[in-house]
Amino acid sequence: MIKQGRYLKYGGQYVPEVLIEELDRVAETYNNIKDTDEFKNEFNDLLNNYANRPSLFYYAKSMTEDLGGAKIYLKREDLNHTGAHKINNVIGQALLAKKMGKKRLIAETGAGQHGVATATIAALFGMECDIYMGQEDTERQKLNVFRIELLGGRVHPVTSGSKVLKDAINAALQEFAANPNEVFYVMGSATGPHPYPTMVKDFQSVISVESKKQIKEIENKLPDKVVACVGGGSNAIGSFADYISEKNVDLIGVEAAGKGVNTNLTAGTIEKGTIGVFHGMKSLFLQNKLGQINPVYSISAGLDYPGVGPEHAYLNDINRAQYVGITDDEAVEAFNYIAKKEGIIAAIESCHAIAYVKKIAPKMNKNQTIICTLSGRGDKDVAAIAKYKGVDVDE
Amino acid sequence: MNRLEEKFKNNKAFIPFVVANDPNLKSTIANIKALADGGADVIEIGIPFSDPVADGPVIQRADVRALKNNDLDIDKLFSMVDEIREYTDVPLMFLTYLNIVLQEGYESFIEKCYFHEIDGLIIPDLPFKERNELLNYINQDKLSLISLVSTNNSESEIKNIVTNSKGFIYLVSSLGVTGERSSFNEDLKDYVQEIKKYSDIPIAIGFGIHERKQANEIAKFSDGVIIGSACVKIVEKYGINADNKLKEYAKMIKEAII
């Protein structure tokens, strides 16, 4: 990183002037408090006593034996309160919001996990909560809409554009621009204008800080590979963070290839994207020659995003991390596989990472290890998977 | 003094806005000619973007219409400018998002602006602190990169922005996105005074203005009014036959601000 908020040519703060003042205030407050004992103690207390951390580090014995290669460990973010890694980041940002005196949290959500996590912490902190969700996603993830409402949050279905995650971010940014001094925008991924990519990484880095300690205790060495799924890239950057300086650990981000990276129905941003500016950041985006952002597709609402966090674009450029694509079919197959082999119903997002582990583990030897982050649980996906298989279940 | 700045000399400028290719390029050309005939001093041409985060619903819908047929490219836009230039030398500005400029290439886009006599650029998602990456390619005597000042900017930021700007200052009347409003930040006059403290650069006010009376009020303490959504609404309503309505509207506003 060359300067704050920049990852070589990526990152930055490409937002309307009206937001600059407030973003600077967020960045400044964050920098002032992040290393204080008070903030760290509050953050860790909530992580440990509210969100159920440290998350389990589970040796997937059946998978390992079945695949016949590297030992596979699963970092169980799915066991966090609210069922995904999202809560780590929300706790951090909501604490910051509280310090800044904000009374209302706003957030975008794709699959609904980040919306649920934000509504949860808003309830805990006694704050108001407005969640922006693409209309198509509100239909794909009805249960999460209801969950958010149960928690006291308001869901605003977004009907502009392609009515998915990117449009929800547009709407949340607009609400932020209309009330910059009043609301705190809890960005759900390691995306957006500075300071969000840095802040989200910091809050999610607990995943790799824990897993490093955990694998050292069991294996007495670092993992050979760390694998995580990438939409905007928050669970992946958190899973990578503490290993980035460990050059012998391979870092692999798994994107949603949808129907295939060479089709139009894909979300393979790093594989197929080009440099652009969108949602406040310079990064890689799926777009056309004129610079219009392309509609993207994935079976997974959480990976259905045309861009990627700027640090991932940077890690890809410098070859520190490798990014690969997994199709809908492969992800659904992995969803079935891990359910039957390990008794875990994992989020369809995380199953993209599992699918890639299935490909590489057999080619590795038995002394080697892979850590795969299970970013969320799959209860939310059961109905969609049933539909995909042509089974009619009554929600 | 360039052509843009001259328009503010002893004159309250009326700056309307339409989106290119809404609903097609031929009608956009007719609409811009009509606005010029109606007395517009400067005309803003929006290059449509798939995700216009600084714009409200009216302009969002215009961008959707303009991109619907997926038939637009940069060269068609500049050919459109050439056709307009055969008719009028009214200063023309592009308003678009940074990604559009970046995809063409900063240098190439700016060269084309010079060649086709575009007078200014407004890029809402390029704040002052990030603007150097584009400004490095621009000779502001030929093409003004317009700075936006918001009522949320601090005094020190306002000072920094206005002392480093050319053309005019686009003062954003209220927080949020573009679109018609019934009321404005009451401190707007103070912001104008604040800017005048540091520079004699003209100040045009936009975001939310749509009625004759509002334009008249705003023009009393500023150097110009920018009207976007209200013009785009006319195009939305009258489709390919909006030119005469736009001309009437321009005449009405221009009379109101003299």
Image (tube, coloured by chain):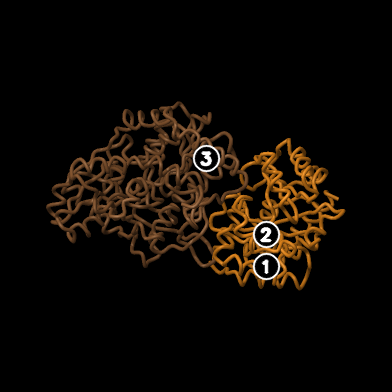
Chain colours: A brown, B orange
Q: What amino acid is at disc 3?
A: Ala
Q: Nearer the viewer, residue B10 or A59?
A: A59
Q: What amino acid is at disc 1?
A: Cys
The residue labelled by disc 1 is: B113
- Label 3 and label 2 in one chain: no
Q: Secondary structure at mark 1?
A: helix
Q: CA distance from mark 3 to mark 2?
A: 29 Å
Q: Position of residue B158 (x, y in %)?
A: 70, 43
The residue labelled by disc 2 is: B121
Q: What amino acid is at disc 2?
A: Leu
Mark 3 is surrounded, within 10 Å at the Cα level, by few (under 14), some (14 to 19) or many (20 or more) other residues, namely some
Q: CA distance from mark 2 to mark 1?
A: 9 Å
The residue labelled by disc 3 is: A27
Parent chain of label 1:
B
Image quadrant holding the N terminus of chain B, namely bottom right
Q: Position of residue A355 (x, y in %)?
A: 25, 56
**Could you tell me if the residues under marks 2 and 1 are in contact, i.e. CB atoms within 8 Å?**
yes
Q: Secondary structure at mark 2?
A: strand
> Is A68 left or right of A321, judged from the image as shown?
left
Q: Nearer the viewer, residue B103 or A31?
A: A31
Mark 2 is surrounded, within 10 Å at the Cα level, by few (under 14), some (14 to 19) or many (20 or more) other residues, namely many
For image coordinates 70% across by 69% down, the residue present is: B114
Mark 2 / mark 1, whichever is N-terminal: 1
For image coordinates 73% across by 60% down, the residue present is: B43
> Is B107 left or right of A116, judged from the image as shown?
right
Parent chain of label 2:
B
Q: Secondary structure at mark 3?
A: helix
Foreground disc of the pair 1, 3: 3
For image coordinates 58% across by 53% down, the residue present is: B60
Q: CA distance from mark 1 to mark 3?
A: 36 Å
Foreground disc of the pair 3, 2: 3
